[in-house]
Image: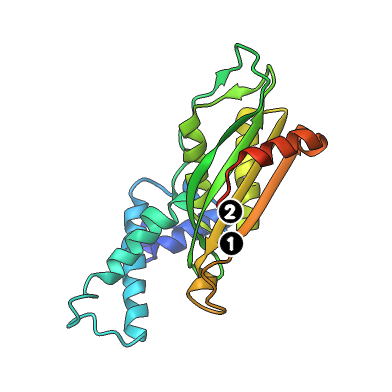
Amino acid sequence: MSTQEDEGVPISVKIRQRLKAQGHRFHSNDNIAQFIEPGELDLLLDEVSEKMQAVLDSMVIDTENDHNTQSTARRVAKMYLKEVFNGRYVSPPEITEFPNAEHLNELMIVGPIRVRSACSHHLCPVIGQVWIGVMPNEHTNVIGLSKYARLAEWVMGRPQIQEEAVVQLADLIQEKTQPDGLALVMEASHFCMGWRGVKDMDSKMINSIMRGVFLKDANLRREFLSLIPRSQ
């Protein structure tokens, strides 16, 4: 597209064109950071702010005279792009990996890691916690404990359904560490059940992922599950 033709084209359209040209999927829980050029996220914020203002106008909210909503469109756009859905638009966190020099081969559990996401069906909050179990081997890469939380934050910072989110996180940790076994449990409250529909604030959803030796060894699996202090 020439510079002249480029004028007036929304930045979201330009990004979408790049994605389609490369045959890259851009579902709600996909990361598209590699298709966003420097400075374009701020342009996208301007565009989303304008469209969010149009949503408020269509909902017949007087944002000109209501002091509580005069800047709401910008605040909401910034919240989604820079915080709640930030995992879609930024590259993965830098993770330093160390060799397993001491040949550690005992169960390691990290958690609970507090996670915050959003339901891709209603864009309502999903708030919960994750426990990660790793059974290393001599070839396993060792990463810092805080890095598990960083990876979880990056994956969960997208519109998700919980069943897919835990698989994405497990795939990422497995790729980074290459353990003999990986276990992951996520427990979360879904505000799409508490705010709307059945309005049940007490229900939680629990998912587990068991791979490698955790899947094959029932005793190891029981040990992991017995050591995570889930809320009752």
**In the image, is residue 88 above or below residue 196?**
above
Q: Is residue 178 left or right of residue 113?
A: right
Q: Which mark is residue 187?
A: 2
Determine which quarter of the picture holds residue 160: bottom right
What residue is shown at x 55% (from left), y 52% (from top)?
231
What residue is disc 1 on? Answer: 204
What residue is shown at x 51% (from left), y 78% (from top)?
196
Residue 162 location (% of width, % of height) = 60, 57
Mark 2 residue type = Glu
What element does badge 2 sit on? strand
Residue 110 location (% of width, % of height) = 55, 35
Measured Cα–Cα span from mark 2 to mark 1: 7 Å
Residue 137 location (% of width, % of height) = 69, 21
Q: Is residue 179 left or right of residue 95?
A: right
* Front residue of 206 and 88: 206
Residue 42 location (% of width, % of height) = 32, 55
What residue is shown at x 29% (from left), y 64% (from top)?
75
User: Is residue 183 among the parts visible in the rendering?
Assistant: no
Q: How many badges with numbers are in the image?
A: 2
State which tag comes first along the sequence, 2 or 1.
2
**In the image, is residue 48 above or below residue 23?**
below
What residue is shown at x 32% (from left), y 88% (from top)?
60
CB-based contact (under 8 Å), mark 2 and mark 1: yes
Q: Is residue 216 left or right of residue 46?
A: right
The image quadrant where one finds the C terminus is: bottom right
* Front residue of 41 and 161: 161
Question: Within 10 angstroms of label 1, few (less than 14), some, or many (20 or more) residues?
Answer: some
The image quadrant where one finds the N terminus is: bottom left
**In the image, is residue 115 above or below residue 60?**
above
